Amino acid sequence: MKAQNTRVVDYGGDALAEAARLIRAGEPVAVPTETVYGLAADATNAKAVARIFAAKGRPAFNPLIVHVRDLAEAERLGVFSEEARALAVAFWPGALTLVVPVREDSGLAAAVTAGLATVALRCPAHPAIQALLAAAGRPLAAPSANASGAVSPTRASHVLASLGGRIPMILDGGPTQRGLESTIVAVAGGTVRLLRPGPISFDDIAAFASGVGSQASGDGRIEAPGQMRSHYAPAKPLRLDATSASADEWLIGFGAVEGDDNLSPAGDLAEAAARLFDALHCADAQRRPRIAVAPIPKEGIGLAINDRLGRAAAPRT
Ligand code: TXA
Ligand code: MG
């Protein structure tokens, strides 16, 4: 892949017009969402989608999430059962991705779904990607804007460190609010299965849809094709449930476990989720060769935090 100049541009009218021009020309652009930064490209253009896979070094079997402006656009791409529609109405725009049967006439590039009969759809809440969707006038495929297997980016500087030289532009909208990738559920007819825990908890989902199956995550099974056990990996070894650190460890604290850094001194799980990936990026940049992380309660969004930490600690395969 030829090295290119990556421009980081503050989000605003001019930046948006330039980003939309690049999207229409089939180029990928990094853009903030409320979860993490995404690497967006025209989901209907096979060459544009191929550039996402090339820039990330992403294996071709791993399908992409397609971002849409609203439920009406989503229903032109996928088939919505009553349950799927109820969830979209309850949580969109927001941090929920729905995997539903793909429409034959969706017009999506084949690589987006990696040959599956389903498509992952999300209507994001962040104004930057909403404005880009409106300006580009087409659905945007957008995985997290990091090299495949690395920690997801929650700041423009994380994107630049991971994909600088490989993409033309990063829209800088500041740090993302949620900090963890969207919750993914598969809706097949009347059944709802959790594929990836995230900011919207399984209990929240169960309140809005019948047919919710037992929580599938955490038992090591690969549900979404991209959910490899070792994923979101920092460059250094990582130890979980640490209440103190050895001399060669950088301790990421939580609550009363103070640490060198602290995800949330007040013990607030939403704050910890928002800070998690930045803390991992920051720990990677320290001199100390190892990372330790304080225990995080396994409740609410803490389940998603523990899911990401478990993957970050798993040996790379
Ligand atoms: O918050 C998010 O979801 C972010 C922002 C940018 O929207 N995106 C994101 O994309 O996390 P990515 O590519 O890093 O993760 C998408 C996950 C992958 O594990 C992929 O395998 C899964 O979604 N996925 C995509 N299409 C699928 C499908 N049809 N069936 C099952 N899993 C699917
Ligand atoms: Mg990712």
Image (cartoon, grey):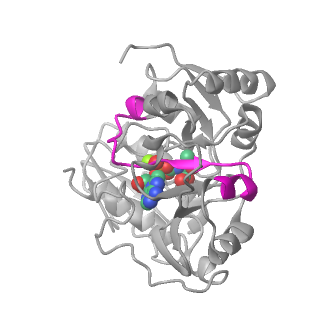
Residue sticking out furthest to the front: 105
Q: In this view, does 64 lie to the left or right of 87?
A: left
Foreground residue, 121 or 247?
A: 121
Residue 178's place in the image compared with 221, above or below, is above
Residue at image position (50%, 13%) is 5
Residue 220 seen from this side: yes
Residue at image position (28%, 55%) is 230
Image-quadrant location for residue 169: top right
Q: Where is residue 56 in the image (x, y as percent from the top left)?
A: 40, 34
Q: Give the range drawn in magenta.
A: 53-76
Residue at image position (74%, 68%) is 89
Q: Position of residue 31 (x, y in %)?
A: 62, 36
Foreground residue, 37 or 221?
A: 221
Residue 62 is covered by the magenta coloring: yes
Q: Is residue 300 left or right of residue 63?
A: right
Residue 266 seen from this side: no
> Quadrant location of the N terminus?
top left
Residue 234's place in the image compared with 100, above or below, is above
Foreground residue, 260 or 164?
A: 164
Residue 74 is covered by the magenta coloring: yes
Q: Where is residue 17 in the image (x, y as percent from the top left)?
A: 75, 23
Q: In this view, does 200 lie to the left or right of 229?
A: right
